[in-house]
Image: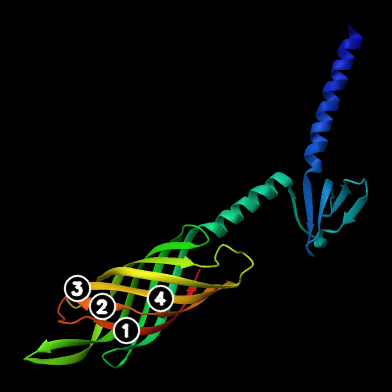
Amino acid sequence: MKKLIFTLCAVFCAAMFSFEASAQEQEILRLKDGTEIVGVIERLPNGGARVTDINGDTFVFAADEIALITNAEQKAKNEKIEKRKLNSGYAGIVQAGIGFSVLGGVHFTAGMINAWKINPWFYLGLGLDIGTTLCEYYDNHAYDANNTFIMPIYLHLRYSILGGRPNNKVSPYIAFNLGAETMQGGGFFFGPSVGIQIKGLNIGDMWIAFDLPCHLLGDSDVSYIDFCLKVGWTF
């Protein structure tokens, strides 16, 4: 009976030791030069670490050589989080542009789009622009063109053609805006645009676009079109 109890205790202890060793073997030590070593990691009092890898080789690293100590499960979790961030989430877009109205005259615009990145290809958001343009009015049996202050609010839909390819730093895209004018008696606003997006910059993604906004103001007898070159940042 004593032998049986001793055997069971030994098996239990061996199983616990094996479980602990297995958990330790999943730890990963990453050096500041990017090297990763998997093995049993012992933390040293001076902040360094002693690593025994899967081949049984032992290495000792000083604290200033170590970037991170983690385990495989946590690493997989972090990679999943990063992938989710890459594939979807909030995207703020700020933009400014200069253009030319078909009625003549230079105009300026600036705005922001609060968008949701549905996946690496599609963005859906709500935008607000503030700008000027030249609008034609019919007054006293004659047409007259005046500078007009506009502030359209619109739904923004964007498709990034190469957005799903992480190695592509430059991606062309197409977009379409649809909404309403909030100034000059209200009205209708829509416009397509095409551009390129430069990804992976330290301060966000930069994009350059050719925009073709079309307006129909409530107190104007005619619609008008602008040609606009825009530059913006996505963060």
Query: Residue 9, percent across and down?
Result: 85, 18
Q: Are marks 2 and 1 in contact (CB under 8 Å)?
A: yes
Q: Earlier in the sequence, mark 2 or mark 1?
A: 2
Query: Residue 208, percent across and down?
Result: 48, 79
Distance in Å between CA atoms under marks 2 and 3 = 10 Å
Residue at mark 2: 215
Per the image, label 2 sits on a secondary structure element best described as strand
- Closer to the camera in the image, 43 or 220: 220
Q: Residue furthest top?
A: 1
User: Above or below — where is 11 with respect to 86?
Assistant: above
Residue at mark 1: 226
Q: Residue at x 44, y 71 (%)?
A: 174
Q: How packed is label 2: few (under 14 Cα within 10 Å), some, or many (20 or more)?
A: many
- Closer to the camera in the image, 111 or 216: 216
Q: Are marks 2 and 3 in contact (CB under 8 Å)?
A: no
Residue at mark 3: 186
Q: Are marks 4 and 2 in contact (CB under 8 Å)?
A: no
Residue at mark 4: 193
Per the image, label 1 sits on a secondary structure element best described as strand
User: Above or below — where is 56 with respect to 46?
Assistant: above
Dividing the picture into quarters, in which one does residue 184 lie? Answer: bottom left
Q: Earlier in the sequence, mark 4 or mark 2?
A: 4
- Closer to the camera in the image, 40 or 129: 129
